[in-house]
Image (cartoon, rainbow, N blue to C red):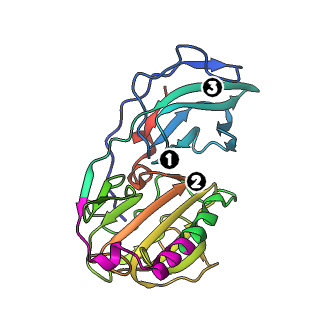
Amino acid sequence: MSHRRLRPLTSLAVAVALGTAAPGPGAEPRAPVRPGTVVRWPGEGIEWCELGARRSEPLGGACYFPVDLLRKAGPLALARGRGGKRETAALRVGKFDYPIQKLTLPRHMVELSPEDLERVNRENREMARLWTREGPRRFSLPLEAPLDPLPAGGRFGHRRVINGSPRSPHGGADYSVAEGTPVRAAADGTVAMVGDQFFGGHAVFVDHGDGLLTMYMHMSRVDVAEGASVRRGERVGAVGSTGRATGPHLHFGVRWRGARVNPALLLGEPGAILTIE
């Protein structure tokens, strides 16, 4: 299985305070963190990692902090435990700066009838229940690419203007490939939900533990059942154009601890992820 490598990003120089509950004055990074990214904080002997009210275990000798695509600009306080001490770091989330993508779609796919709107709202509620799932981690980084080979593409975070009206930014990555191309699970996990959605078409959601869920949408067929255990690289379906799609492609999305993050970051080597020194 092949996947694209990401070029390493410049590390953030962040002031770290030992044994304090919050970052002290002057602990701002040199550059803001982009929404929809992941921050990596490596170190020896890390015992726990904390963002907000949520604690997690280190992964491969580092803390990972997903930053939601729609998180507002402002301060972001991180913490970790080492040797019985609490260490903190201060970051700042920058303004939303993704490109604008203009699309033209048939009116019935954009201007929803009351019945379609009710369906979409119901499907959104069903998905929202998945983002709070907990469980032991069943994955390692990098994740397996869902397609082999993984083509160029993505458009994660692009702000969409559909038929002239602004819409929500793109929360996943789109890869255009031939219909019927096998779609593979990014890591071991449990099929949390299988759906036939208005927007996503035939869709599969896989829970990998530690709050990480991957989603595979617009598929022509689904090859797994809800509740089934899947292995890394196992086929979960085939590429299609079901739901709101203008041609065959895979929409691959990632939610990590509730945050919408760029899937490409987790498909590349961990060392390429934005790192706190």
* N-terminal-most mark, 1 or 2: 1
Discs 1/3, front: 1
Q: Is residue 115 magenta?
A: yes
Q: Residue at x 43, y 34 (%)?
A: 33
The residue nearer to you, when weighing 153 against 186, is 153
Amino acid type, label 2: Gly
Which element carries disc 1, helix, strand or loop? loop
Q: Residue at x 52, y 57 (%)?
A: 255
Number of residue marks = 3
Which element carries disc 2, helix, strand or loop? loop
- Is 140 located above or below residue 186 in the figure? above
Q: What mark, if any, has residue 258 been given in the picture?
A: 2
Q: Is residue 189 magenta?
A: no
Q: What mark, if any, has residue 220 been given in the picture?
A: none
- Is 146 located above or below residue 5 in the figure? below
> Which residue is disc 3 drawn over?
88
Question: Disc 2 to disc 3, how far (Cα)?
Answer: 22 Å
> Which residue is disc 1 drawn over?
68
* N-terminal-most mark, 2 or 3: 3
Residue 56 % position (x, y): 67, 45
Is residue 197 something that shows in the picture? no
* N-terminal-most mark, 1 or 3: 1
- What main secondary structure does the magenta stretch of the protein show? helix
